[in-house]
Image (cartoon, rainbow, N blue to C red):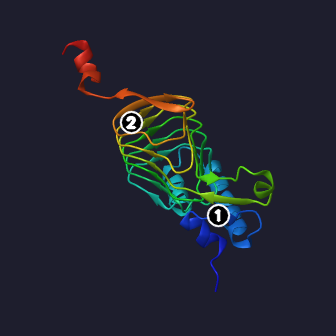
């Protein structure tokens, strides 16, 4: 038996995203589940947690995620403990999207695993592939940060608001821009106590 579109998607190979019944059903299910989460009362934290656990692949302890949330499949998203995700996140999770522990993610965040052909006739056939995204522990991503397919952001990074992250960012780096570029390493000199002379 040949490999399915879901198999190819999971392997990072090219696949037909638009004409596969299994993937269409999985996306429809995820959209319904995200809709339920987005309609839950913000004060009903147990219900929100239940819905997130049903929708996403892994939700760590003390994760706070504010609606609205959008996903493609949900099961490829992993969010580590003590992480906060502000309003308007979109996880385009054809491949794994891993968010580490103790991260802070600003509003209108986008993690986009899908990569489309450059040649128009191939693109119009619905062919794509999905490449994993990783955000390490203890990262802070400002508002409207977008991460492109296959990118890893190292532990302890700060990514400035509005950044378009197209390449890997080394750990403990301040980076921003479109395209996002490393500016400098984050060090003990950046501590508030150091700046205030305490």
Q: Position of residue 136 (x, y in %)?
A: 39, 46
Q: Secondary structure at mark 1?
A: loop
Q: Which mark is residue 86?
A: none
Q: Position of residue 65 (x, y in %)?
A: 51, 45
- Of the image marks 2 and 1, the number of the one nearer the N terminus: 1
Q: Rounded to the nearest whole Å, what is the CA distance between mark 2 and mark 1?
A: 31 Å
24 left or right of 48 in image: right
Pointer 2 local density, CA inside 10 Å: few below 14, some 14–19, many at least 20: many
Q: Position of residue 84 (x, y in %)?
A: 45, 42
Instruction: Name the residue located 67 percent from the left edge and 53 percent from the top edge.
Output: 35
Instruction: Say whether marks 2 and 1 touch (CB < 8 Å).
Output: no
**Which is in the foreground here, disc 2 or disc 1?**
1
Tell me where residue 94 sits by quadrant. bottom right
Residue highlighted by disc 1: 14
Residue highlighted by disc 2: 157
Instruction: Name the residue located 35 percent from the left edge and 38 percent from the top edge.
Output: 156
Q: Position of residue 31 (x, y in %)?
A: 68, 57
């Amino acid at each position: 038996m040949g490999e399915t579109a879901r198999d190819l998607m999971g392997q990072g190979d090219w696949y037909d995203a638009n004409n596969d019944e299994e993937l269409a059903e999985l996306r429809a299910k995820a959209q319904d589940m995200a809709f339920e989460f987005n309609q839950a009362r913000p004060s009903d934290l147990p219900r929100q947690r239940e819905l997130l656990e049903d929708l996403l692949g892994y939700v760590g302890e003390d994760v706070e995620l504010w609606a609205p949330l959008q996903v493609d499949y949900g099961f490829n998203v992993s969010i580590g403990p003590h992480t906060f995700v502000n309003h308007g996140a979109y996880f385009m999770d054809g491949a794994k999207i891993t968010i580490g522990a103790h991260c802070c993610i600003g509003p209108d965040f986008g993690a986009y695993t899908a990569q489309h052909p450059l040649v128009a006739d191939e693109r119009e056939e619905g062919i794509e592939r999905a490449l994993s995204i990783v955000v390490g522990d203890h990262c802070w991503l400002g508002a409207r940060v977008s991460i492109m397919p296959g990118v890893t952001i190292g532990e302890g990074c700060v990514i400035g608001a509005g950044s378009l992250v197209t390449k890997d960012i080394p750990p403990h780096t301040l980076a921003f821009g479109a395209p996002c570029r490393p500016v400098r390493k984050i060090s003990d000199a950046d501590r508030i106590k150091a700046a205030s002379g305490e």
